[in-house]
Image (spheres, rainbow, N blue to C red):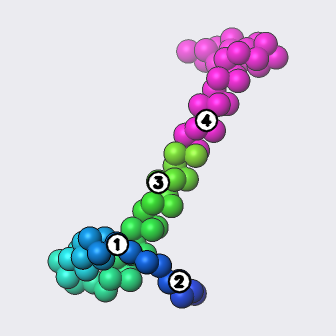
Amino acid sequence: MNLYRVQILLKRRQHERLAQIAREEGKSLPEVARELIRFALRERQRRQMELAAQILLDEYRSNPDLTAFTALDSAGE
């Protein structure tokens, strides 16, 4: 895993909370920060995919060229 140095400024409370989590979990503060960033990035990607799926669903339901396929959706039921 390639790591890149990044410098960020945290508010005192943010730093204290990260340090507390790191102590509780027996991890380093940078490790906890990387985990939280990884989680936030995955959640952001999930929300973007959900939005894209909703847009596609709306398009599928309203586009006459696509609604013709609706009959095929329920043909196997």
Residue annotated with mark 4 = 53
Q: Which mark is residue 43?
A: 3
Q: Is residue 61 visible?
A: yes
Residue annotated with mark 2 = 6
Q: Picture coordinates of residue 55 (x, y %)?
A: 65, 31
Q: Residue at x 76, y 17 (%)?
A: 63
| Mark 1 element type | loop
| Mark 2 element type | loop
Mark 1 vs 3, N-terminal side: 1
Mark 1 Cα within 10 Å, few/some/many (few <14, many 20+)?
few
Residue annotated with mark 1 = 11
The answer for how far apart the CA atoms under marks 4 and 2 are is: 34 Å
Q: Picture coordinates of residue 10 (x, y %)?
A: 38, 75
Kind of residue indicated by mark 2: Val
Q: Residue at x 61, y 35 (%)?
A: 53
Kind of residue indicated by mark 4: Ala
Mark 4 vs 3, N-terminal side: 3
Foreground tag (3 vs 2):
2
